[in-house]
Image (cartoon, rainbow, N blue to C red):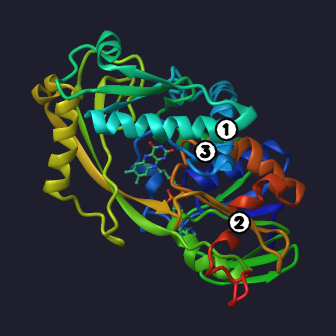
Amino acid sequence: MRTFDAIVVGGGLVGSAIAYGLTKAGLKPALVDEGDVAFRASRGNFGLVWVQSKGLGAPHYQRWTRLSAEEWPALAAELGESIGINVGLQQPGGLQLCLSDNELAQRRAMMEQMRIEAGNFGFDYRMLDRQEVAELLPGIGPSVAGASWTPYDGHANPLNLLHALHRGFLAGGGTYLPNCTVTAAHAAPRDFRVTLGGEEIAAPRIVLAAGLGNAKLAPLFGLSAPVRPQRGQILVTERARQIWSMPLGSLRQTQEGSIMLGSSEEDVGFDTSQKPEVMQKIAQRAVLSFPWIAELQIVRAWAALRVMPPDGKPIYDESERFPGAFTANCHSGVTLAGAHARAFAPMVAAGSLDPMMAPFSAKRFPESPDVPAAA
Ligand SMILES: Cc1cc2nc3c(=O)[nH]c(=O)nc-3n(C[C@H](O)[C@H](O)[C@H](O)COP(=O)(O)OP(=O)(O)OC[C@H]3O[C@@H](n4cnc5c(N)ncnc54)[C@H](O)[C@@H]3O)c2cc1C
């Protein structure tokens, strides 16, 4: 039986960032991944490192996202220097366009609530009127009423990030076990064993980061991860000259020049098919924002499934029944990569989660096994 310092289940962005972080903490983990049969959000996302709308009514989530955005430059630099992969991080701030006065008023109220909830921590934002947006972004459409701006937002190349995290993990002494599905496990406090294709592997720590697979895996370890799929569709245009200096929430220009248009939020179960009517709505909103986008050819489009907790906020937990077992679930695995690699992984390495993570526990959901039925 091979033994490791930790087993991380799930080789998407969440699992890879945590597994990479564990190697930086000096551990020798195994990263187990199911392979191409899975629904992998990490290969179908929009690539935003996005802060400005995260954590309304949940200041702990706003702080966690901000922390991640702050850790991102060090993560990107570290991966660039040690692995030689440019993950394309740019954090020039971000704009969210509003296409009516009503949208602008709602956005203003939301941003102000975020500022109030941030308290002493602070939340820097500005609302821009139409004229100010026009000065920053050439060729806006007549419907653009204004925009919200924060300095914290950015974007990156998510495929390069995933590749770099895997390479960094291997370079740090991690063991990658692909094409292995975890379906059963032996769990005891700080003693976890999983059987993979006839071989048993063991570790004193296990991290469930299997995306949508976590819903089934978590109960095996006394945990709960009631995540559901949420479909998102994305369109990509041919390359254009570099035109925007920052990402715009549902529009972003890649470093290669393509413009990504996205992304829908659809509750349709495990269905990754594309729907012309949804694609049309995405394109229409982009053209209302910038009429010149209509001249560009759409060269690619896809659908992928987000890993969505019931209230949209991440779930991080450690098992009370089986100390040493952890779970991590979120719908912003690009944005939160900095926190996963540089804050969450060190907590796992140290053996328990920091008390600041308590509000992220699945105990907040009535169906959690840790919540008494009458509660
Ligand atoms: C359309 C769309 C747009 C998005 N845009 C953004 C964005 O702009 N910014 C942002 O921050 N986030 C964005 N996201 C979300 C982001 O992509 C996800 O949060 C992130 O990819 C989730 O990563 P994950 O590792 O949890 O899940 P996944 O990528 O699904 O990976 C889970 C992995 O676990 C493995 N697995 C599952 N079950 C098992 C098992 N039993 N045994 C072994 N392995 C298993 C699978 O093989 C898979 O590789 C977007 C998502 C979508 C769909």
- Considering the numbered disc 1 on the image, is that residue within a helix, a strand or a loop? helix
Labelled disc at residue 336:
3
The image quadrant of residue 240 is top left
Give the residue displayed 58% in from the left and 71% down from the top: 214
Q: Nearer the viewer, residue 278 or 298?
A: 278
Look at discs 3 and 2 and give the one toward the viewer: 2
Tag 2–tag 1 contact (CB < 8 Å)? no
Q: Which residue is mark 1?
A: 118
Tell whether circle 3 marks a residue whose Cβ is less than 8 angstroms from ligand 1: yes
Crowding at mark 1 (Cα within 10 Å: few <14, some 14-19, many 20+)? many
Observer able to see residue 88: yes
Identify the residue at the far left of this view: 295
Q: CA distance from mark 3 to mark 2?
A: 17 Å
Tag 3–tag 1 contact (CB < 8 Å)? no
The quarter in which the N terminus is drawn is bottom right
Look at discs 2 and 1 and give the one toward the viewer: 1
Tag 3–tag 2 contact (CB < 8 Å)? no
Q: Amino acid at mark 3?
A: Leu
The answer to whether residue 347 is above or below residue 137 is: below
The quarter in which the C terminus is drawn is bottom right
